[in-house]
Amino acid sequence: GNSVTQMEGPVTLSEEAFLTINCTYTATGYPSLFWYVQYPGEGLQLLLKATKADDKGSNKGFEATYRKETTSFHLEKGSVQVSDSAVYFCALSDLKGGSEKLVFGKGTKLTVNP
Amino acid sequence: EAGVTQFPSHSVIEKGQTVTLRCDPISGHDNLYWYRRVMGKEIKFLLHFVKESKQDESGMPNNRFLAERTGGTYSTLKVQPAELEDSGVYFCASSPGRYSPLHFGNGTRLTVT
């Protein structure tokens, strides 16, 4: 079945450091790919998405490119801030069963120190 | 606009008891989803409502779980009887259309002791 593998955390960085969180997927067909973020005490929020190969999703300084050849969707940010501390989830859409449902990775906790 | 609301935010119950979780979606959102994250594992799909109908319940773990969405508004997820492995965070999400972005609630943290 479809699955998502993302790098294990936690990840701790200093402010202004470069961030990469790796995400690879296994899927039949061509799913849409997503990054969700969960800030402390809040629900999941869609951070960015890409719907086809070579698409780049971007938001709030974060970027991820849909790489079909490597089945990857790595999340990057050039300069992280303390406010980026959160749990990040990579996900793909699965249309099996007549419903578009999300298949998530395990999440990566990011802590950014001042 | 008010977001997706879930309550309670936390629930601690003993094994064998019953718990009911509630989700109020964003008004006008026909699609309502339940997901669950067991400690240290992936967030997993449980089921999907379109209005009051169950579109897909393939993720429901067993018949101790019962979800309802009477009138196509709020939804409840009942666990009866609860087992230790049911502990986790239960998320509800809603969307206006089938391929629209999901809006998630803050989740209900369920602890079964």
Image: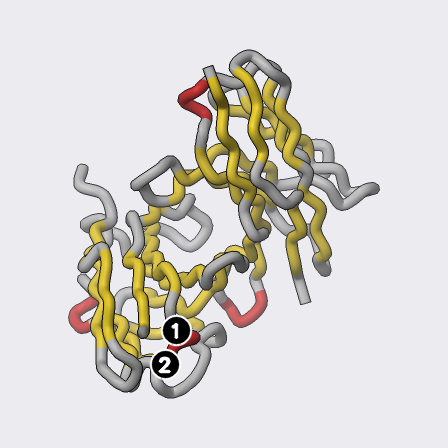
**Residue A70, percent across and down?**
81, 42
Question: In the image, B32: left or right of B42?
Answer: left
B31 vs A89: above or below: below
Q: How many marks?
A: 2
At x 53%, y 59%, the residue is B41
Question: In the image, B37: left or right of B1?
Answer: right
At x 21%, y 72%, the residue is B20
Q: Are marks 1 and 2 in contact (CB under 8 Å)?
A: yes
Q: Residues within 10 Å of mark 2 (few under 14, many from 20)?
A: some
Whether residue B33 is visible to the viewer of this picture, yes or no, is: no
**Residue B29, percent across and down?**
27, 52
Q: Quadrant of residue B22?
A: bottom left
Tag 2's secondary structure? Answer: loop
Tag 1's secondary structure? Answer: helix
Question: In the image, A58: left or right of B107?
Answer: right
**Residue A57, percent across and down?**
58, 29
A77 vs B49: above or below: above
* Front one among A5 and A29: A5
Task: Say which residue label 1 marks.
Answer: B86
**Residue B78, percent across and down?**
26, 76
**Circle 1 chain:** B
Calculate the distance from the C-alpha at mark 1 to the C-alpha at mark 2.
6 Å
Say if labels 1 and 2 share a chain.
yes
Task: Say which residue label 2 marks.
Answer: B83
Question: In the image, B42: left or right of B15?
Answer: right
At x 59%, y 21%, the residue is A77
